Amino acid sequence: MTQGNGLASGLPQRNLGGGRHHDWRRRPRGPVYAALDLGTNNCRLLVARPMSFNGNGAVGFKVIDAFSRIVRLGEGLGGAERGAAPVLSGPAVERTIEALKICAQKMRRCRVSYARSVATEACRRAANGASFLTRVEAETGLSLEVISPDEEARLAMTGCLPLLDPEVPHALLFDIGGGSTELSWLRVSTDHDAGTVAHMLDSISLPMGVVGFAERYGGRHVDRAAYRAMVEEVGAALNSFDAVHEISAAVRRGAVQMIGTSGTVTTLAAVYLELPRYDRATVDGIYLSFDVMANATRQLKDMTFVERAAHPCVGTERADLVIAGLAILDAICRLWPVGRLRVADRGLREGILIGLMKRHRDWPRHDDGAPE
């Protein structure tokens, strides 16, 4: 298997047996691609086959396997004692390596041809991040690449491109993560051949995410003062970004759309829709008005920790993080009252897959560009 950074992954190409992939494995249909995103809170994997490609750069693919697990790799990073270097804790490392072993197994089973595995904020910040990555490669065969906040934002933009409205000239795209929040200011246009096109004008990475905020301000019980403090902290951090790009003025002109890609916004959408369990197909791409979001936010804030944990679309793993995420979302919406938000259950992993498929276009194709 070839990693996106050109390094061999070390994963043996062998059939582990079992599973639901037997049918397509019997008939080779071109290469298989994998994108792995190790964040501060989550470990996520997508495995896909290309379904279409044209000369203008448009790529379509079909997901054939996926994995997501909350590992909280960055647990404790934000609470390091003053002057002490932030480090990944032993329990967090063990949880994460177990999840990565599952990802590696899935990639072998799917006979992945090309993969890119990236790590974000937790590994950027941790003093022992490099030794952690060395251990990951030794125990799983996965070579993880620590990417910059700017590249993280660009990959998310690529993954969310199909959700942008080409009739609205600017977009605010944000991702509320475990250890940081990435926000991008985009110019959106239409190209006669390529369709919707987005150009990143600038991006900002705030060292504020749901895990760090929950550790600082509380997660099980968040009083009004703590919630207000989180909102104010995020708002203050975004003021200069707003002023430099005159985003508020563009919002007042109706020239801005907003897309959110994170567990916070997908959870909020699922709560609003009263889903009996989370369903990506229902949530991805839905529009939420700010009034709807405010009502769903109040609903979650009024719940006890036990009630949030019991909610089928929140669960025990997010119950102590969701209020922190809502505070970050609240700050973004207060500063930029666009009026509605488009929810994206997609982003960085999809951006990685598209990049890999464009770089390694060696699948057999019909004349119309579709893989055989």
Image (tube, rainbow, N blue to C red):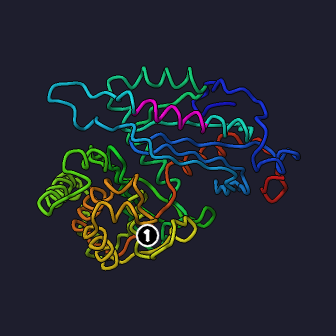
Q: Residue furthest left?
A: 225
Please give the name of the residue rendered at 46% of the width and 30% of the height, measured from the top-left corner.
Answer: 94
Q: Residue furthest right?
A: 27
Please give the name of the residue rendered at 33% of the width and 58% of the height, measured from the top-left corner.
Answer: 322
Q: Secondary structure at mark 1?
A: strand
Could you tell whether 110 is left or right of 134 in the image?
Answer: right
Disc 1 residue type (three-letter): Arg
Could you tell whether 312 is left or right of 371 in the image?
Answer: left
> In the picture, residue 232 is in which quadrant?
bottom left
Badge 1 density bin: few <14, some 14–19, many ≥20, Cα 10 Å: many
Residue 130 magenta-highlighted: no
* Residue 98 spot, x, y in % from top left: 53, 34
Q: Tell me if residue 20 comes above or below residue 266 in the rendering.
A: above
* Residue 239 spot, x, y in % from top left: 18, 56
Which residue is the site of mark 1? 342
Please give the name of the residue rendered at 49% of the width and 21% of the height, measured from the top-left corner.
Answer: 135
Could you tell whether 207 is left or right of 280 in the image?
Answer: left
Majority secondary structure of magenta residues: helix
Give the tally of numbered discs.
1
* Residue 299 spot, x, y in % from top left: 30, 73
Residue 101 magenta-highlighted: yes
Magenta-drawn segment: 92-103
Viewer-side residue, 354 vs 19: 19
Could you tell whether 291 is left or right of 44 in the image?
Answer: left
Viewer-side residue, 320 vs 348: 320
Which quadrant would the N terminus be assigned to in this image?
A: top right
* Residue 136 spot, x, y in % from top left: 52, 26
Q: Tell me if residue 68 comes above or below residue 129 in the rendering.
A: below
